[in-house]
């Protein structure tokens, strides 16, 4: 039987409609779509797709179960390895992970693995089967474990450890759980309802979550050990925004993407005045950067009423780090791309102190730099003025420095990241582990989840060897 050469298309809201709301853009597969896509899987004897999955899902097995219309067994198969499938099915960059390793992808488009994962996760939720599908965990607890941060690394580590028989408590500094999943990803890509369902699944497994606790200030890591925790996993992410270091960055109307998205997502400022947190957005918005956070910031700006939104990026489109589908969505929504362009000054109104323009310079590309991307080189005399009234800086984030500052014995890398053993995640302090952006710098949700999984496995091995 001939295989369809292209992935089954994902149904989406029309661009002219979605720019006026914060509802989910990708609408998810119908059953017909899912069955059509599942048939494309070759069921390889040596499934290289699993090698590309940081959380080690048995991909061919769950797709085979979809083909057999056994959706409940399919979601159970996924949850053997991944407790957050509805999240991963939406925001994981499968094109760089499992789908990049798909054998079919060598000659055609790879199987839409993420779209199928989302389908069965959504099916389970709609059928009301999440609670009845909860796996049994050991009643006798091996030891107390503390997890710092409720982002993707912390949630995954906690979920894996509780299933192994540990008494796990997550400490979260904010008033709501989810970390970057809640404050960093817009509602139209990851609805808060979906996030809450997946976190509640972990709570029902037995994971305890305590909010409004700032580890390093409210309580320290040494104090947690004194309270009887036998091991600690740090997954506090990369919450320190990077800036360009150019004149005018302190003007009114300049945001870090971190602050901007946190206000919109966590504090629901897009609902103002229904909520208490307003956010000021101008008519012409420039977003500096071209990663997923930049695309999110640009697309949020449109929905908040901006008339023109620009992505300003110093390299060309082929070097953009954002997911291809997010770039396509941004283009469909009317966002304009100023490529090979670098801001060199943000210009303000002397009377009001507000942004009124941005001075930029054009670039050409030279040889590849340490990132593997071609290095941008300014073109002399190519400066020009771009009229904007809001600037959002989305050029990455550095590891959150709070915990490292409170632990002088913790060894750090050059960029303030916590140094860990690559295989186990253990830090320079015995029984203290770290993973995700706090260890690697800003990366993907699924990479953080993989780090949480590896750490959970290592913690279990170490503690069991002591008993």
Image: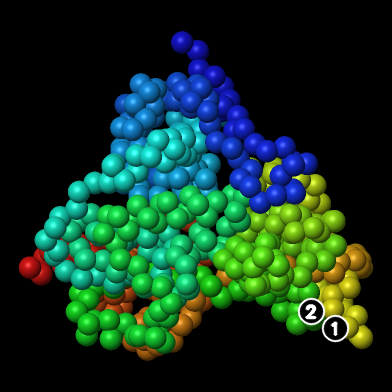
Foreground residue, 303 or 87? 303
Badge 1 density bin: few <14, some 14–19, many ≥20, Cα 10 Å:
some
What residue do we see at 91% from left, 85% from top?
350
Q: Which of 256 and 131 is in front in this view?
A: 131
Proximity of marks 1 and 2: CB atoms separated by less than 8 Å: yes
Mark 2 = which residue?
Answer: 252
Q: Position of residue 43 (x, y in %)?
A: 37, 25
The residue depicted at 26 percent of the width and 59 percent of the height is: 206
Q: Quadrant of the C terminus?
A: bottom left
Secondary structure of the residue carrying tag 1 is loop
**How many tags in the picture?**
2
Q: Depth check: give the residue in front, 445 or 105.
A: 445
Q: Residues within 10 Å of mark 2 (few under 14, many from 20)?
A: some
Q: In this view, does 43 lie above or below 387?
A: above
Q: Which residue is drawn at 49% across and 76% down?
A: 400
Please report whichever mark, 1 or 2, sits nearer to the chain's N-terminal start: 2
Location of residue 167 with respect to 318 vertically, above or below: below
Mark 1 to mark 2 CA distance (whole Å)? 6 Å
Q: x and y percent of residue 48 in the render?
A: 38, 36
Q: Residue 279, position in %: x, y?
A: 72, 70
Figure quadrant of residue 380: bottom right
Q: Which mark is residue 391?
A: none
At x 60%, y 73%, the residue is 241
Q: Can residue 85 be seen in this view?
A: yes
Q: Is residue 25 above or below residue 238?
A: above
* Of the pair 414 and 389, the residue shown nearer to us: 389
Indicate the position of residue 212 as horizontal and vertical percent values: 43, 77
Colour convention of the picture:
rainbow
Image side of residue 132 versus residue 180, left or right: left
The tag on residue 353 is: 1
């Amino acid at each position: 039987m001939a295989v369809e050469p292209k992935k089954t298309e994902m149904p989406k809201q029309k661009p002219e409609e979605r720019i006026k709301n914060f509802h989910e853009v990708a609408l998810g597969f119908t059953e017909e779509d899912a069955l059509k896509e599942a048939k494309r899987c070759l069921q390889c004897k040596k499934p290289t797709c699993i090698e590309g999955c940081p959380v080690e899902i048995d991909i061919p097995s769950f797709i085979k179960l979809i083909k057999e219309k056994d959706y409940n067994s399919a979601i159970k198969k996924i949850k053997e390895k991944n407790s957050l499938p509805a999240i991963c099915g939406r925001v994981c960059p499968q094109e760089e992970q499992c789908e990049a390793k798909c054998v079919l992808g060598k000659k055609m488009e790879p199987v839409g693995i993420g779209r199928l994962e989302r389908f069965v996760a959504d099916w389970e939720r709609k059928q009301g089967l999440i609670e009845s599908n909860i796996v049994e965990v050991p009643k006798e607890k091996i030891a107390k474990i503390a997890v710092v941060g409720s982002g993707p690394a912390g949630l995954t580590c906690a979920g894996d450890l509780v299933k192994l028989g540990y008494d796990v408590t997550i400490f979260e500094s904010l008033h709501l759980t989810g970390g970057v999943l809640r404050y960093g990803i817009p509602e139209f890509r990851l609805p808060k309802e979906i996030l809450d369902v997946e976190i509640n699944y972990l709570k029902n497994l037995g994971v305890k979550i305590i909010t409004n606790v700032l580890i390093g200030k409210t309580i320290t890591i040494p104090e947690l050990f004194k309270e009887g925790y036998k091991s600690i996993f740090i997954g506090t992410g990369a919450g320190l925004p990077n800036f360009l270091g150019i004149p005018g960055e302190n003007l009114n109307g300049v945001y870090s993407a971190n602050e901007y998205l946190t206000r919109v997502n966590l504090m629901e400022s897009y609902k103002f005045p229904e909520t208490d947190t307003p956010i000021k957005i101008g008519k012409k918005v420039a977003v500096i950067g071209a990663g997923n956070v930049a695309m999110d910031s640009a697309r949020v700006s449109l929905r908040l009423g901006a008339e023109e939104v620009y992505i300003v990026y110093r390299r060309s489109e082929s070097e953009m780090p954002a997911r291809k589908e997010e770039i396509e969505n941004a283009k469909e929504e009317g966002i304009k791309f100023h490529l090979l362009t670098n801001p060199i000054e943000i210009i303000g109104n002397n009377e009001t102190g507000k942004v009124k323009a941005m001075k930029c310079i054009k670039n050409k590309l030279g040889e590849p730099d340490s990132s593997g991307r071609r290095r941008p080189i300014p073109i002399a005399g190519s400066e020009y003025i771009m009229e904007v009234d809001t600037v959002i800086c989305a050029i990455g984030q550095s590891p959150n420095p709070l915990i490292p500052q409170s632990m002088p014995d913790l060894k750090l890398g050059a960029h303030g990241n916590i140094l860990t053993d690559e295989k186990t995640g253990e830090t320079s302090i015995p029984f203290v582990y770290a993973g995700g952006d706090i260890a690697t710098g800003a990366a993907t949700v699924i990479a953080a989840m993989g780090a949480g999984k590896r750490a959970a496995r290592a913690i279990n091995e170490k503690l069991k060897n002591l008993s």
